[in-house]
Amino acid sequence: MKVRIALIGDYNPSAKAHEAIPHALTLACGADIEAQWDWLHTSTLTGERADQLAEYDGIWCVPASPYANMRGALKAIRFARETGRAFLGTCGGFQHAIMEYAEAVWEVAAAHAEVDVDAVEPVIAPLTCSLVEQSGELYFEPRSRLALIYGATTASEEYHCRYGLNPRHAARLASGALRIAARDGADEVRAVELDGDQFFIATLFQPERSAFSGRRHPLIRAFVVAAHDRVAA
């Protein structure tokens, strides 16, 4: 059976991540998984849109924010989280996955400093050091799903971002279902995941860029497999 994946974001052919994602998915699928993916511009995500997203087995919230319709992106992430769809968020998808959870579970204002410059305590704030076109070392949390996927304790990944989780909110990830999955060398949060059986992982880095070197990325492969398993169940 064919796996259907929704790419949530505003497609821009000049964005490196957007160029990489179809290639990364093709590599991830390999010869054993047949998949179809559709770009869903956030401007089309009006209302709850459960009818539109229900046909998808996996939802990937992609880079290149701010989105045209931030509320639409947040609703798509909530739909994935609440219905058990396989979810992957990268870069802007990481930021908005945390915002959705902050709003729904922490019950705090889901403010992003890039679009709400007057926010007193934004959930997403400017990084201490910009990570535009940078790479860096990651350190996975022991026993995290992400560590299991990589089969390692560390890895090096590429970034293209200026915003991340406000460190003042990081302590909230010490309890509850959404947990830290990876940090960088300065102990800043670089990936989160949901506890339990659901595949729900968000990374500030962009694993899709591995496609430029022709490498099948273990995280994207795991995402595709999780979506496939939902179809097969």
Image (cartoon, rainbow, N blue to C red):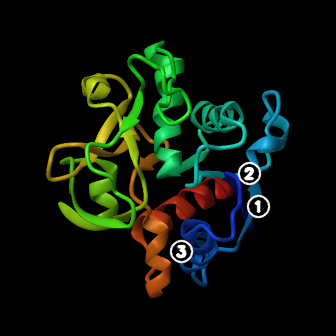
Q: Which residue is mark 3?
A: 28
Amino acid carrying mark 2 in the image: Tyr
Report the front residue among 121 and 104: 121
Mark 1, Cα crowd under 10 Å, few <14 / some 14-19 / many 20+, is few
Q: Earlier in the sequence, mark 2 or mark 3?
A: 3
Are the residues at dot 2 and dot 3 in contact (C-beta closer than 8 Å)? no
Picture quadrant where residue 227 is located: bottom right
Quadrant in which the N terminus appears? bottom right
- Residues at marks 1 and 2 touching, judged by CB atoms closer than 8 Å: yes
The image shows residue 46, relative to residue 219, as above or below, that is above
Q: Earlier in the sequence, mark 1 or mark 2?
A: 1
- Residue type marked 3: Ala
Is 19 situated left or right of 211 in this image? right
Q: Earlier in the sequence, mark 1 or mark 3?
A: 3
Contact, mark 1 vs mark 3 (Cβ under 8 Å)? no
In this rendering, position of residue 46 left or right of residue 100? right
Question: Which secondary structure lies at badge 1?
Answer: strand
Residue identified by numbered label 2: 56
- Where is residue 88? Give x, y as percent: 52, 51
Q: Nearer the viewer, mark 1 or mark 2?
A: 1
Q: Which mark is residue 38?
A: 1
Residue occupying the point 85% across, 37% down: 51
Q: Position of residue 161 (x, y in %)?
A: 42, 53
Q: Is residue 199 above or below residue 214?
A: above
**How far apart are labels 2 and 3 at the CA level?**
17 Å
Residue 195 seen in this snapshot: no
Q: CA distance from mark 1 to mark 2?
A: 9 Å
